[in-house]
Image: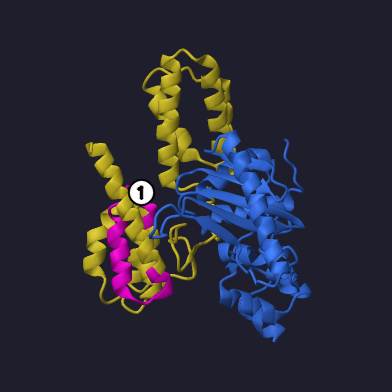
Chain colours: A yellow, B blue
């Protein structure tokens, strides 16, 4: 088995464990052991969202423990969280707030609480994990098509990508692809500017 | 009671929307109950509804119960419904409902309405399968099996943990839709709410 296969296998196993404990957490929301096992599994995944979702469920299900007995666990995981998310959880630890049933700290991987819609600025229909994956795939596909001199495919991939960015308001993927392609002298035509302008307008409205 | 709840809610300044769980509750049945229709009402306009407007039509007890069930979220801001044509919106939104970013939407007549990640052939085949399963569930219900389920998952591994393919059935204005999701289904998301909101308010406007 190659290293790559082994990594994939280990990740798949971590996903299964994560899902197993997601079910247990759903059935026993106050069981701290289940939450911790789930958080441990999420640390083995490459994305940040499962960890954030699991921690948000933990803070909701075991709210009574959070201000008193969570520092060791939080110290272990905090660097895997985005700074604003880390701050959100810190506010809960210092009793400035409790996590509600609909929360900006929840993710689509949460099972006890749901992501809140009460935030216009963060109205991203895409997660940053997905945006990064998409930008990686798109960049690779475009570079490959350029190497093959397949100009029709390039235009098609670009159009699909613009449609994705506009529909999902995905400024992150757009910036990442723009940046990566720019480093290899990509020819950005008018469609790239139009897409960027569209995304800029969305910020202003 | 209405006055008490309204003041507790600050009904003139609080907007209401459905949560992902609320979407499942509201749109799961081909013949929705009055309560389910009242939930659907929240997804029927071009922007989020004020609590006060909703309470003019429906009871305060319902609202309280829906909030307790986690079907409704109270918002402090007004949100506009997604206004892109469906063909420019659905494929990209539905992608985030799948752990593998492969998903499709089929009609209850077996047509593929949107797809991402799947080839056209795969999406067409799965849309036909989804329509068959939807019909199967309706027939079982008519025969007396109280099928309340809104989704079917298929697994390859014996631990039944991560599905290979899931079909989620929704009924919007008398039309059936099936979400076809590859890998881990991730419907607890804002994208799921916005997708149904777009379907409900678009009048099936597919072209720009």
Out of A182 and A135, give the one closest to the viewer: A135
Q: Which residues are magenta?
A: A24-51
Give the class, few, some or many, for how many residues have Cα within 10 Å of label 1's Cα (few <14, many ≥20): some
**Residue A103 is at least partly visible in this image:** yes
Whether residue B206 sits left or right of residue A105 in the image: it is right
Residue tagged 1: A47
Residue A4's quadrant in the figure? top left
Q: What is the x, y in percent for residue A18? A: 35, 59
**Residue A203 is at least partly visible in this image:** no
Out of B53 and A77, give the one closest to the viewer: A77
Tell me the chief SS of the magenta region.
helix
Whether residue B127 sits left or right of residue B205 in the image: it is left
Q: Is residue A97 above or below residue B120?
A: below
Q: Residue at x 22, y 38 (%)?
A: A3
Image quadrant containing the N terminus of chain B: bottom right
Q: Residue at x 75, y 43 (%)?
A: B205
């Amino acid at each position: 088995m190659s290293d790559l296969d082994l990594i994939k296998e280990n990740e798949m196993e971590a996903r299964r464990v994560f899902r197993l404990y997601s079910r247990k957490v759903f059935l026993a929301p106050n069981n701290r052991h289940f939450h911790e096992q789930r958080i441990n599994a999420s640390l083995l995944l490459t994305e940040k969202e499962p960890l954030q979702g699991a921690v948000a469920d933990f803070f909701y299900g075991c709210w009574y423990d959070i201000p008193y007995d969570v520092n060791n666990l939080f110290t272990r995981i905090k660097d895997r969280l985005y700074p604003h998310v880390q701050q959100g959880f810190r506010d809960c630890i210092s009793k400035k707030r409790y996590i509600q049933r609909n929360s900006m700290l929840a993710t689509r991987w949460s099972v006890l609480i749901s992501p809140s819609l009460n935030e216009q600025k963060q109205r991203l229909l895409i997660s940053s994990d997905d945006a990064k994956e998409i930008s990686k795939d798109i960049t690779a596909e475009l570079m490959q098509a350029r190497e093959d001199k397949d100009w029709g495919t390039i235009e098609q991939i670009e159009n699909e990508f613009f449609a994705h960015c506009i529909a999902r308001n995905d400024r992150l993927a757009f910036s990442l692809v723009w940046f990566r392609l720019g480093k290899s002298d990509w020819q950005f035509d008018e469609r790239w500017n139009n897409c960027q302008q569209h995304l800029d307008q969305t910020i202003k409205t | 009671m209405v006055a008490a709840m309204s003041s507790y809610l600050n009904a003139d300044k609080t907007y209401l929307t459905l949560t992902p769980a609320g979407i499942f509750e509201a749109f799961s049945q081909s013949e929705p109950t009055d309560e389910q229709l009242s939930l659907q009402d929240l997804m029927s306009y071009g922007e989020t509804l004020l609590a006060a407007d909703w309470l003019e039509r429906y009871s305060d007890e319902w609202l309280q119960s829906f909030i307790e069930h986690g079907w409704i979220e109270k918002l402090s801001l007004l949100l506009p419904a997604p206004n892109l044509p469906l063909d420019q919106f659905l494929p990209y939104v539905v992608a985030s409902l799948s752990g593998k970013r492969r998903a499709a939407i089929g009609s209850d007549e077996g047509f593929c309405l949107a797809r991402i990640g799947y080839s056209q052939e795969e999406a067409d085949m799965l849309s036909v399968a989804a329509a068959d399963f939807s019909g199967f569930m309706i027939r079982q219900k008519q025969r007396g099996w109280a099928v309340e389920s809104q989704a079917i998952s298929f697994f390859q591994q014996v631990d039944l943990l991560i599905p290979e393919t899931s079909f989620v059935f929704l009924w919007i204005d008398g039309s059936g839709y099936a979400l076809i999701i590859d890998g881990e289904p991730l419907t607890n998301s804002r994208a799921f709410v916005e997708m149904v909101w777009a379907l409900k308010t678009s009048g099936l406007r597919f072209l720009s």
